[in-house]
Image (spheres, rainbow, N blue to C red):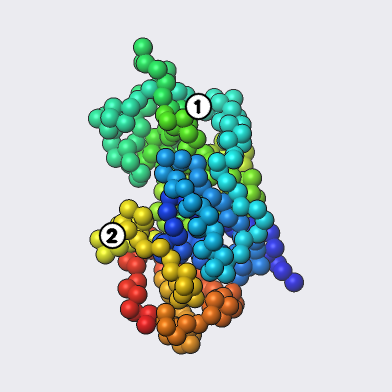
Amino acid sequence: MNLHSHYRGRFAPSPTGPLHFGSLVAAVGSYLDARAQGGQWLVRIEDIDTPRVIPGAADDILRTLERLGMHWDGAVMLQSQRQEAYRAALEQLRHGDWLYPCACTRREIADSALHGVDGFVYPGRCREGLPDGRTPRATRVRVASTAIAFDDAIQGTISQNLAHDVGDFVVWRADGLFAYQLAVVVDDAAQGITDIVRGADLLDSTPRQIYLQQRLGLPTPRYAHLPVAVSARGEKLSKQTLARAIDTQHPAHEIIKALAFLGQTLPDGLASSTETSNASVEEAWRWAHTHWDRSRIPRRRTIQAIDETTLR
Ligand code: GLU
């Protein structure tokens, strides 16, 4: 009998380059957490930030997941095809009088604002109306000066005061694109996601997302934020830090490294698997599906990526 068949998890990569170790950790964590609880695992391509999208990257990520034996449920959702849903959400917020147009440029904000948890705290200059002669650029949502708290399954209780830590934030960007914070909330609800397992680099975005869920009358999923792989210099592994693409010639080895990064205690046979004496993908998943232990995941926001030699 399956007690947790209502679990619906997801992996939501941005197609800004091939899958690398950092994004693989989020894929493996979300996948196993769903499968170990008999849940579904969906994939959504977050190609909303079109200037950052690399042609072919979405396909490349999907093919890599397949080669790693990570099979998703249902059709892949593409944010680039969801404009109508985002527009409707924006209308709903406008209707509730939560939105206002903002004329401020980045430079103007930088000149007058304090640093918050994620860039500058918007000082609210356009909150009561645009200054004379200014044209609107972006659309912001008004936030309240109350704490938004949630219990993260890995990182513990997180609390933020949006007014103090973030300020009124952008939901419709000056370049005419919907903001990630809005899209992710609309899409998680549309896909019926109950459990979000993703990197802790998004921990500080979660209160904004919960705030939007509340304004839009959408359910708040459970959250578990995984430690993020960083370089020796503390930078998140990304295309910019030249993180290398996942080696699809040795898929089991890549999975095993991600499992070790997530604190899972691998049996000797798997732990000693290397690129040359390779365990099979099936073997790795068979072990992981039954032994996945969320309580072993380090309760940290960042971890220096494991030197590959430690697994040889
Ligand atoms: N698209 C985001 C990323 O690749 C992840 C968003 C999410 O998981 O909510 O960093």
Residue at the (45%, 45%) spot, across then down: 53
Q: CA distance from mark 1 to mark 2?
A: 36 Å
Q: Name the residue type under label 1.
A: Leu
Hey, which residue is sitting farthest right in the picture?
Answer: 1
Q: Is residue 254 visible?
A: yes
Residue at the (39%, 35%) spot, across then down: 167
Q: Secondary structure at mark 1?
A: strand
Q: Please, is residue 109 above or below residue 226 in the view?
A: above
Q: Nearer the observer, disc 1 or disc 2?
A: 2
| 1 or 2: tag closer to the N-terminus | 1
Name the mark on residue 143.
Answer: none
Name the mark on residue 99.
Answer: 1
Q: Relative to the observer, which residue lies in front, 165 or 63?
A: 63
Q: Which residue is mark 2?
A: 234
Q: Name the residue type under label 2.
A: Gly
Q: Is residue 156 visible?
A: no
Q: Secondary structure at mark 2?
A: loop
Q: Residues within 10 Å of mark 2 (few under 14, many from 20)?
A: few
Q: Position of residue 120 (x, y in %)?
A: 32, 37
Q: Relative to the observer, which residue lies in front, 58 or 202?
A: 58
Q: Please, is residue 245 above or below residue 47 in the view?
A: below
Residue at the (38%, 22%) spot, across then down: 103
Q: Please, is residue 108 above or below residue 209 in the view?
A: above
